[in-house]
Image (cartoon, rainbow, N blue to C red):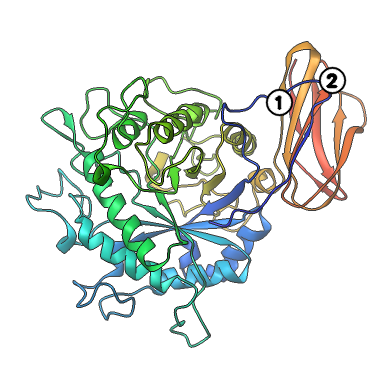
């Protein structure tokens, strides 16, 4: 993945910025995840993603939908069984707007599921012990089709390159990968490692430069171990670590998971990204440092491949907040905007290098739909109205109280120029409290001497962030 290079400006005036143990990343990418990008309105919504603060898009590729029967030659992207129309459309739209693409592969076709399949009520279609060999063949076809050198079937040169694929969606829950447990013991991690390694090796065989991410795990597990495995427990098992983050048991070479990027979905769709999970092995946005620590321990112990310290990035391919309106069980538009900006800061601090928000546009809400019967998590309403969250993603700005009356200000600049931090107290005008020159996409931090309550915002020319209210 070619993350947009960002310059990290640290002007601390005597105070250190709090950061993850490994250090906050100097590269940071923001994206949107939406199946709209592969639909008939792809051009419109990829363009809106680009002007709404996005560097990238994410689309789900349902393997079981792409194939119409078992391919005669699964290694060839032009096999008659394959239909890549929607994915091609998303990739073209992203390329036309300067966006990178993350493709998440999930859902095995019936002929690629394992033996002994139970009824669908026990294991949803596409989830039962996917065949690693078949998945590896499919990875070869994908890596070839989106290598940047494969002829576009529309006859317009070559299909654009995709250099980041993720293997499965939420492999720690039975909605996507089953079984999770057998006789009280987790088996999904072992199943998943074989899938991950087959995809990694297949794709790299065709294009050594392509980057492979793990599937993003769901945030919560079941305490008794049934249909959901807690994400941190799942990753420790995948990476052969015990609860103390020591190698246990030592992995045989064939069992070491192979990936370039570790992914997780720290979704808390009604609460602040500062709230920690209750379960010891569950992971919200505030807990991402625990996942990073486990990954760095695995690198140090040599239980993951490729070998080396700090060689694997960490991303969040999905995070979201449901809004009211239109869903009366959601949060307000104002709170959604605050949480999305805050999530970027909280995740950046913990060594996360990329974040994708689900969706760019709300799904339509049917009569009687409440809760998650449909998703209203976008930065645009279904009819195209901008929510405040759109500005929060395009020009995020957050402050956090430090000891001694100091205040940390954090922002990601939408364009180059002089960035001004402005403050206003009740009954007063906006006034400048600091400024510096920034590049487009630059992460900017400042330590300010500003005690008490205040409204603050960042500004570059006529572009202004949303105001952030900072309490004492």
Q: Residues within 10 Å of mark 1 (few under 14, many from 20)?
A: some
The answer to whether 361 is drawn above or below residue 9 in the figure is: below
Which mark is on residue 236?
none
Q: Give the residue at mark 1.
A: 17
**Rendered image quadrant of residue 419:** top right
**Rendered image quadrant of residue 372:** top left
Q: Residue furthest bottom?
A: 155
Tell whether 258 sits left or right of 5: left
Name the residue at 52% across, 84% down: 157
Name the residue at 61% across, 32% down: 23
Tell whether 152 sits left or right of 76: right
Tell whether 63 sits left or right of 289: left
The answer to whether 404 is drawn above or below residue 126 in the figure is: above
Q: Secondary structure at mark 1?
A: loop
Q: Nearer the viewer, residue 382 or 46?
A: 46
Q: Residues within 10 Å of mark 2 (few under 14, many from 20)?
A: some
Residue 440 point in image, percent of width and height: 76, 52
**Rendered image quadrant of residue 103:** bottom left
Which quarter of the image is occupied by the C terminus? top right
The answer to whether 275 is drawn above or below residue 26 in the figure is: above
Q: Give the residue at mark 2.
A: 450
Name the residue at 32% across, 58% down: 201
Residue 36 in sight = yes
């Amino acid at each position: 993945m070619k993350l947009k290079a960002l310059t990290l400006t640290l002007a601390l005036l005597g105070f250190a910025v709090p950061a993850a143990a490994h250090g906050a990343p100097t590269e940071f990418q923001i994206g949107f995840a939406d199946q709209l990008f592969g639909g008939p309105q792809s051009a419109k919504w990829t363009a809106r993603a680009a002007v709404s603060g996005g560097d990238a898009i994410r689309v789900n590729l349902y393997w079981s939908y792409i194939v119409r029967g078992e391919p005669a030659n699964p290694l060839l992207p032009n096999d008659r069984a394959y239909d890549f129309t929607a994915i091609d459309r998303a990739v073209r739209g992203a390329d036309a707007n300067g966006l990178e693409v993350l493709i998440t592969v999930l859902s095995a076709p019936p002929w690629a599921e394992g033996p002994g399949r139970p009824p669908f009520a026990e294991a949803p279609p596409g989830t039962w012990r996917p065949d690693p060999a078949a998945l590896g063949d499919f990875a070869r076809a994908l890596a070839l089709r989106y290598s940047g050198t494969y002829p576009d079937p529309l006859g317009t040169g070559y299909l654009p390159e995709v250099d980041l694929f993720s293997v499965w969606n939420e492999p720690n829950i039975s909605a996507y990968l089953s079984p999770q447990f057998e006789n009280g013991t987790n088996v999904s991690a072992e199943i998943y490692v074989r899938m991950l390694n087959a995809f990694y090796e297949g794709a790299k065989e065709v294009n050594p430069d392509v980057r492979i991410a793990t599937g993003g795990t769901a945030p919560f597990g079941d305490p008794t171990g049934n249909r959901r495995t807690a994400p941190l427990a799942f990753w420790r098992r995948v990476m052969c670590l015990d609860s103390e983050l020591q190698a246990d048991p030592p992995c045989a070479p064939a069992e070491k998971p192979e990936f370039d990027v570790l992914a997780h979905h720290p979704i808390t769709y009604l609460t602040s990204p500062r709230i920690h999970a209750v379960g010891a092995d569950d992971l919200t946005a505030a807990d991402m440092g625990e996942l990073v620590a486990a990954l760095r321990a695995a690198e140090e112990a040599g239980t993951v491949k490729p070998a080396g310290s700090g060689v694997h990035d960490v991303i969040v391919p999905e995070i979201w907040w449901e809004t009211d309106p239109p869903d009366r069980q959601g949060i307000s538009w104002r709170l959604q905007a605050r949480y999305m900006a805050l999530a970027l800061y909280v995740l950046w601090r913990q060594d996360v290098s990329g974040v994708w928000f689900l969706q760019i546009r709300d799904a339509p809400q049917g009569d009687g739909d409440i809760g998650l019967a449909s998703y209203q998590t976008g930065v645009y309403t279904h009819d195209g109205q901008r929510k405040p969250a759109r500005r929060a993603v395009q020009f995020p700005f957050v402050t956090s109280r430090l000891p001694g009356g100091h205040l940390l200000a954090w922002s990601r600049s939408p364009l180059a120029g002089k960035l001004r931090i402005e403050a206003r107290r009740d009954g007063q005008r906006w006034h400048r409290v600091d400024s510096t020159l920034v590049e487009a996409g630059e992460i900017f931090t400042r330590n300010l001497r500003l005690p008490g309550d205040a409204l603050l915002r960042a500004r570059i020319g006529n572009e202004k962030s949303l105001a952030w209210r900072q309490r004492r």
